[in-house]
Amino acid sequence: MSALGFKNSLGIHPQTTQLRAARAEILANNLANADTPHFKARDIDFNAVLESESRRSLGMNKTNEHHLEGNVHTETELMFRNPYQPAIDGNTVDTQMEQSFYTENALRYNASFEFLNSKFNGLKGAIKGQ
């Protein structure tokens, strides 16, 4: 394994952008169903999924029984959001909160994308010898 590979150079950011894109779809679905009776807002625990991915990508091996377990594969699933004030028709989508979550997610997606873009530009410059 070379020291200068895509995994080593880019870190967790490719998985982060994919996870942010998936979360954007979930949040957009919540917003689209804001007026649907009995619709339950859903979301993912981004930090838990990211932690699971980072543990998986580190590839730690347990060499002693006193070491903490590496390569933990925790499967996180879509969770229901607890509403602050549920609607009478059973819908749990708070449009303002969903828009806030969507905007924050989009900003963080763009930040990760810009980071990846700068990493690729740096790698391209290294290949060209600049």
Image: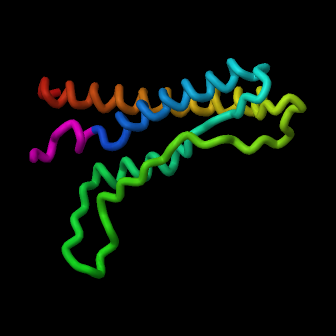
Where residue 34 appears, as percent x and y from the top left, is 75, 23
Closer to us: 122 or 68: 68
Dividing the picture into quadrants, the one containing residue 36 is: top right
Closer to us: 112 or 23: 23
Q: Is residue 5 magenta?
A: yes
What residue appears at the point 40 percent right and 32 percent down from the top-left corner?
A: 115
Q: Is 107 on the left-hand or right-hand side of 73?
A: right
What residue appears at the point 82 percent right and 33 percent down from the top-left corner?
A: 90
Magenta region, residue range: 1-9
Where residue 38 appears, as percent x and y from the top left, is 77, 29
Q: Quadrant of the C terminus?
A: top left
View extreme (left): residue: 1
Can the viewer see residue 39? yes
What residue appears at the point 74 percent right and 44 percent down from the top-left corner?
A: 82
Depicted 27 relative to depicted 32: above or below: below
Dividing the picture into quadrants, the one containing residue 10 is: top left
Can the viewer see residue 106? no
Q: Is 98 on the left-hand or right-hand side of 7?
A: right
Dividing the picture into quadrants, the one containing residue 37 is: top right
Q: Is 128 on the left-hand or right-hand side of 86?
A: left
Q: Is residue 96 magenta?
A: no
What residue appears at the point 17 percent right and 39 percent down from the top-left corner?
A: 5
